Image: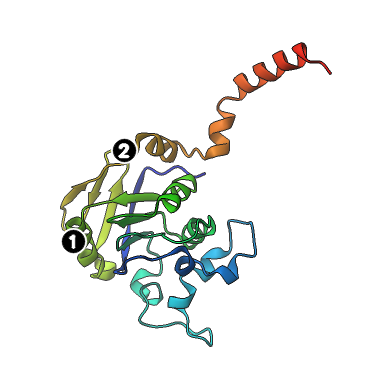
Amino acid sequence: MDKFDKLTSVAAPLPLINVDTDMIIPARFLKTIKRTGLGADLFSTLRFNEDGSEREDFVFNKPAYKDAEILVTGENFGCGSSREHAPWALFDFGIKCVIAPSFADIFHNNSFKNGILLIKLPQEDVDKLMEDAKRGANATVSIDLEAQEIKGPDGGTIKFEVDQFKKHCLLNGLDDIELTMKKNDKIDDFEGRQNAAQPW
């Protein structure tokens, strides 16, 4: 997993509440266990018309937001099913941070395990960042995970809270497998003792 330290990017505004995982990546695209390729179908029902053409009014189809790595959105983001494909699709598309008033629990855990920083803020702070994001390419947002700070395009700073274990994992690029491998010496020691005690 890539390390997450600092991020500066245009922020894409998605002022919707209760965005569920089927909206993030519709069920018809869950035909793979690979983490790559899903970004092409992120928010498919919102991004595309039935004939496959882009909807010009959707945020990620606007030139200013095509390379956005930050998403500012409404409460209860990631609700619905527990599909891990949702954070996979976001990350594959290029989204490395989502800011919202609240997140669904399972989506929250899945996102951190896949390298996406989720920042929960009071509604008034989200509203301010949403307005900043609507300014497009002229308004970049900077996130410093170590300092737990967001800097808006006008220089204002917003502090945020984050679980310290999740912060440690993001800063060091540790997913579940890499966390396990950190204890490789203890695992080898246990297996050696187990094989000696039970050689059969």
Camera-side residue of 107 and 62? 107
- Write the residue at 64% across / 65% down: 31
Kindly state the secondary structure of the residue where label 2 is placed: loop
Give the image location of residue 101, x and y in percent: 27, 56
10 Å crowding of disc 1: few (<14), some (14-19), many (20+): few
Q: How many discs appear?
A: 2
Give the image location of residue 83, x and y in percent: 53, 57
Question: Mark 2 sits on what residue?
Answer: 146
- Write the residue at 46% across / 66% down: 24
Sequence-earlier tag: 1 or 2:
1
Give the image location of residue 94, x and y in percent: 45, 60
Tell me how the rendering is colored.
rainbow
Label number found at residue 192: none
- Write the residue at 48% across / 85% down: 49
- Which residue is outermost to the front? 80
**Residue 92 position (above or below residue 186):** below
The alpha-carbon separation of the residues under discs 1 and 2 comes to 22 Å
Kindly state the secondary structure of the residue where label 1 is placed: helix
Mark nearest the camera among 1 and 2 is 1
Taking 152 as reference, is 163 left or right? right
**Residue 193 position (above or below residue 55):** above
Question: Mark 1 sits on what residue?
Answer: 128
Give the image location of residue 169, x and y in percent: 44, 37
| Amino acid on which the number 2 mark rests in the picture | Glu
Quarter-of-image position of residue 185: top right
- Which residue is outermost to the bottom? 51
- Write the residue at 20% across / 58% down: 123
Decide: marks 1, 2 in contact (CB < 8 A)? Answer: no
- Which residue is outermost to the right? 200
| Amino acid on which the number 1 mark rests in the picture | Lys
Taking 129 as reference, is 117 left or right? right
**Which quarter of the figure is the C terminus placed in?**
top right
